[in-house]
Image (spheres, rainbow, N blue to C red):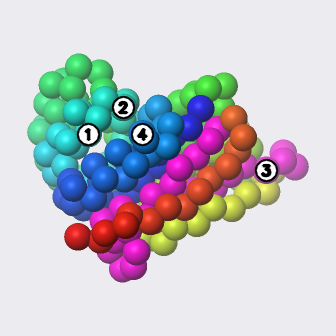
Amino acid sequence: MKICIVSDSHDRAPMLAQAVASAKEAGAELVIHCGDLIGAQTLKPLIALGLPVHLVHGNNLGDPIALWKMCKRSEGLINYHGADIDIEIAGRKLFATHYPHYARGIAALGEFHVVCCGHSHEASVEQQTTIKGGKSWLVNPGSVAGLGGSATWILADLELATFEIRQLLDNK
């Protein structure tokens, strides 16, 4: 299963929608948003795209009441998880949070195949050695808003364990 991993959209709805539309075109069936969405209205264009969205809040929460209302209006497409996501997708255990230091610690436990984070605005993909002697994927999609650099997101194939950092074509 392919998924779209984004973070740090900071109210840039058109850029978030562009990334998700590109991911859908590439076969993604679900979106993980690793926080700093800020305004709930940023998600409105995603409803029309029809992919389920799972998100955490990050350090720029915005209006949580508006976010819950958006979730309700989405009829199950948008799912707000609070501070972190612990979910199984296509037989893979996935964890998402906003903070890289928290994500690295969770990845080191070896309980998840993939651990996603944001906050740094720098895209990265690496394997984290676990305390169980294995490896977990530690994935940060950077900032889909292009804050501090290029606007990036990740197209992940959970079955093949591939994580491709992609750039938006236009950072407007």
Location of residue 170 (image quadrant)? bottom left
Q: What residue type is labelled 1?
A: Leu
Mark positioned earlier in the residue sequence (3 or 2): 2
Q: Which image quadrant is residue 98 in?
A: bottom left
* Range of magenta residues: 132-158
Could you tell me how far apart the alpha carbons at marks 1 and 4 are, in whole angstroms? Answer: 11 Å
Q: Would you name the residue on which mark 2 appears?
A: 51
Q: In which quarter of the image is the N terminus?
A: top right
Residue placed furthest toward the top: 75
Q: Which mark is residue 135?
A: 3
x then y, percent, for residue 8 = 34, 60
Query: Of the residues shown, which amino acid type is indicated by label 4?
Result: Lys
Q: Quadrant of the C terminus?
A: bottom left
Q: Do the residues labelled 1 and 2 touch (CB within 8 Å)?
A: yes
Disc 3 secondary structure class: strand
Residue at 84%, 47% (x, y): give it. Answer: 134
Q: Is disc 1 placed on a helix, strand or loop?
A: helix
Instruction: Tell me the crowding category of disc 2: few under 14, some 14 to 19, or many 20 or more residues within 10 angstroms, Cα based.
Output: many
Mark earlier in primary sequence (2, 4): 4
Amino acid type, label 3: Lys
- Residue depth check, mark 4 versus mark 3: number of the one nearer the observer: 4
- At x 50%, y 37%, the residue is 27
**Dot 2 and dot 4 residues touching (CB under 8 Å):** yes
Query: Mark 1 = which residue?
Result: 46
Q: Is residue 78 left or right of residue 162?
A: left
Q: Can residue 106 be seen in this view?
A: no
Q: Please give the residue where the numbered disc 4 appears in the rendered image.
A: 24
Q: Is residue 158 left or right of residue 7?
A: right
Task: Work out whether mark 1 precedes mark 4 in sequence or the reverse, and give the earlier one.
Answer: 4
Say which label, 1 or 2, has the lower sequence index: 1
Q: In this view, does 124 lie to the left or right of 28?
A: right
Could you tell me which residue is drawn at 43 percent across and 41 percent down?
25
